[in-house]
Image (cartoon, rainbow, N blue to C red):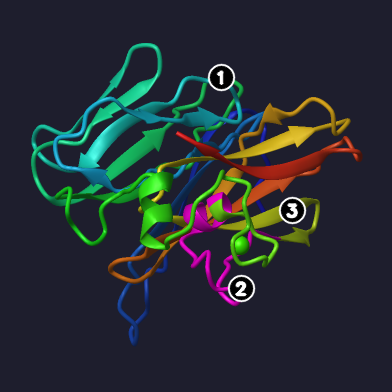
Amino acid sequence: MLTFTGKGTVRVSANQSGDNQYAPAEPVMRSFVIADTLQHIFFEPVANQIKGATGVVLHVVSSSGLPVAVQVLSGSSDSIVTDTSGFELAVGSEVREVVLSATQAGDGDTAPAVEVLMRFQVVEANAVNAPRSFATWQAVYAISGDATNDSDSDGVSDFQEYASGSDPTDPDSSTKVSVVRVDGAFVFTVPVSLRALVDVRVKESLTLSAWTDAAPELLEILQTGSMDNPLQVFRLRVSMGDALSNFWKVHFGAQ
Ligand SMILES: [Ca+2]
């Protein structure tokens, strides 16, 4: 049993020195942080990008409000993230996968956040997995009208079908956002097309009148879909906390 007497990083080592039959076991090290507050990072989905794109705005926040660091973990030698009045990405000159890393080191009261990785492809403008505007996507399906239209009357708006990569002319094709209650939290499953230029936010409200941006916990990002319809499925958790009258919604916005 471990008893904690203060804050800081705890490192635990387990050893077994063996006997005349068994060789010593490899020691196992585990470390964790004792802190007043935990935090997590929410990194909004990033779509595939066309080679050479600059000024790609990244929305990354920590639930603690502490400043997050974002860097290119894997990309072209000229892929770079700058942070002046918000994060902006220059995707670089190579056709390849880019992986961004978001971290927050914590402070005296707050434990470090778990690192979040965001992956997308840098592609040629005419590639089958290239990003496209809502209007270009509408033209592919020979539909028109504004974002709230529901061309196939399946209860999912054309814009939401654009955002989640489903067929807006087939009522059997829609990948809806789902939510389940798990312990003291809700977990949203949100499919997002890597070809859609959308902002994806979770908003919260106590009263259903004023909505503010939440910083949900990113449990998992699954890569799925197909070559010309690449999808990411985000599993996002929001905690009910102390307020029992909270409301949340997933909001898809045009960039
Ligand atoms: Ca629809």
Q: Is mark 2 within 8 Å of ligand 1?
A: yes
**Ligand 1 lies in quarter:** bottom right
Q: Determine whether the residue tagged by mark 3 lies in a helix, strand or loop.
A: strand
Q: Position of residue 185 (x, y in %)?
A: 76, 51
**Residue at (37% x, 69% y) in the render:** 17
Pointer 3 local density, CA inside 10 Å: few below 14, some 14–19, many at least 20 = some
Query: What residue is at 41 percent from the left and 49 percent from the top?
Result: 196
- Res. 171 mark: 2
- Identity of the residue drawn at 65% across and 50% down: 237
Q: Position of residue 218 (x, y in %)?
A: 54, 48
How far apart, in angstroms, are the residues tagged by discs 2 and 1?
Answer: 53 Å
User: Is 176 covered by the magenta stretch?
Assistant: yes
SS at badge 1:
loop
Instruction: Identify which residue, 57 or 223, lies in the foreground.
Output: 57
Camera-near label (3 vs 1) is 3
**Quadrant of the image for the C terminus?**
top left
Q: Nearer the viewer, mark 2 or mark 1?
A: 2
User: In the rendered image, which quarter contains the N terminus?
Assistant: bottom right
Q: Give the residue number, with chain letter if any, for mark 1.
A: 108
Give the farthest residue toward the bottom.
21
As drawn, is 189 to the left or to the right of 233?
Answer: right
Of the residues under marks 3 and 2, which one precedes in the sequence? Answer: 2
Q: Answer left or right for 106 relative to 4.
A: left
Q: Amino acid at mark 3?
A: Phe
206 relative to 167, above or below:
above
Res 87 quadrant in image: top left
Q: Position of residue 16 (x, y in %)?
A: 42, 68
Q: Which residues are magenta?
A: 159-178
